[in-house]
Image: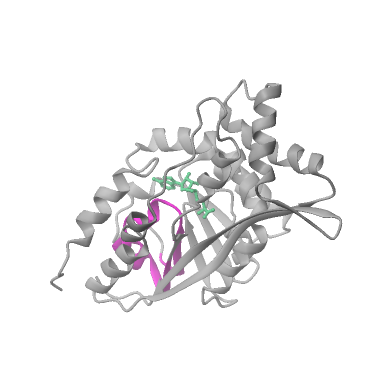
Amino acid sequence: MNSLVNWSAIQELNARSLPGGTLSEKGANEMWSRVAKMYDFMAGLERQYTLNQVNAMKLDKEDSVIDIGCGVGRLTVPIAQRVGRVTALDVADKMLEICKVNVEKAGLDNVSYKKLDWNGVNPNTSIEKHHIAFASRSVGLKDIIKLNNTATKYAYLLSFTGYPSLRDVQMEMLTGIRGIKKREVNEEQSRMFGYNITFNLLYDLGIDPMVQVVEDGFERTYESKEEAYDDLRQVTVELGENADLTDEEENLFQQNVDEYITYIDGKYRFLRNTKTFVIGWKPITL
Ligand SMILES: C[S@@+](CC[C@H](N)C(=O)[O-])C[C@H]1O[C@@H](n2cnc3c(N)ncnc32)[C@H](O)[C@@H]1O
């Protein structure tokens, strides 16, 4: 179908500005493996809100599901609890390793793992079809046709609608430390390059997308502020080998964290709210 606007070109330009968007298989494995532990920690803070995303997907207990760029299994685990089986696909060894641990911790035995570079997958031949194929905050967002052709019942794309993303939440705990700056967000511009692009790409392919935007967030409740700092300090792994904070850096870290802590009923709650879009569609022949 002819398109009024060249959404593919807009998506391409936007994707180039995303981290890891143009990495080789080896480069992607290295980069994502390095941050896997951090992702696992952040996925823990997001556990409750992640269920909003799972609830937005039509899932049956007989379904087979493929999670493209599964990461540490943030969605793999709660989805595997609701369906027949899940294939967890990722390019990064460390992500898959942690995903396996999380699946086992949840007592599940219906997940299989595939270490694969999704960019190298041929859309028509080289991947087994599943009832549901989805990509959340991952490389799968880039290639709608490949995702469409991997699903027989529904395909889904999920990501943050805008600010703050997981990376913003993580980095803003470290703002001011070793040159780390808060990302400057132009709200108008980030809305211009939002899920409207995905919606329109799907629309122009002849698909009728279902769009849901769900509440998302990173939260945990602690007995004391010290307990909160000790736990949230895990984000400092981002600083590399010499991640120990000096006294001055520790003060900055605590000030940053304090902005998002509220004292309720004798407990300290860290909360950063955000929103995630879940766009689904019935696959069509493309
Ligand atoms: C931001 S994480 C998202 C993880 C998970 N889907 C979630 O929503 O929590 C992106 C994931 O995509 C994986 N990834 C990046 N490039 C990939 C590629 N070319 N093929 C397969 N997986 C890839 C990364 O290793 C990482 O686990």
Residue 77, quarter of the rendered image? bottom right
Nearest the viewer among 134 and 224 is: 224
Residue 98 appears left or right of 24: right
The quarter of the image holding the C terminus is bottom left
Q: Residue at x 53, y 74 (%)?
A: 56
Is residue 244 at least partly visible in the picture? no
Colouring scheme applied when the structure was drawn = one colour
Nearest the viewer among 40 and 122 is: 40
Location of residue 263 with respect to 1 vertically, above or below: above
The quarter of the image holding the N terminus is bottom left
* Count of picture labels: 0
**Residue 24 placement (x, y as % from top left):** 34, 36
Residue 17, quarter of the rendered image? top left
**Residue 34 placement (x, y as % from top left):** 53, 33
Q: Residue at x 74, y 39 (%)?
A: 229
First to last magenta residue range: 129-156
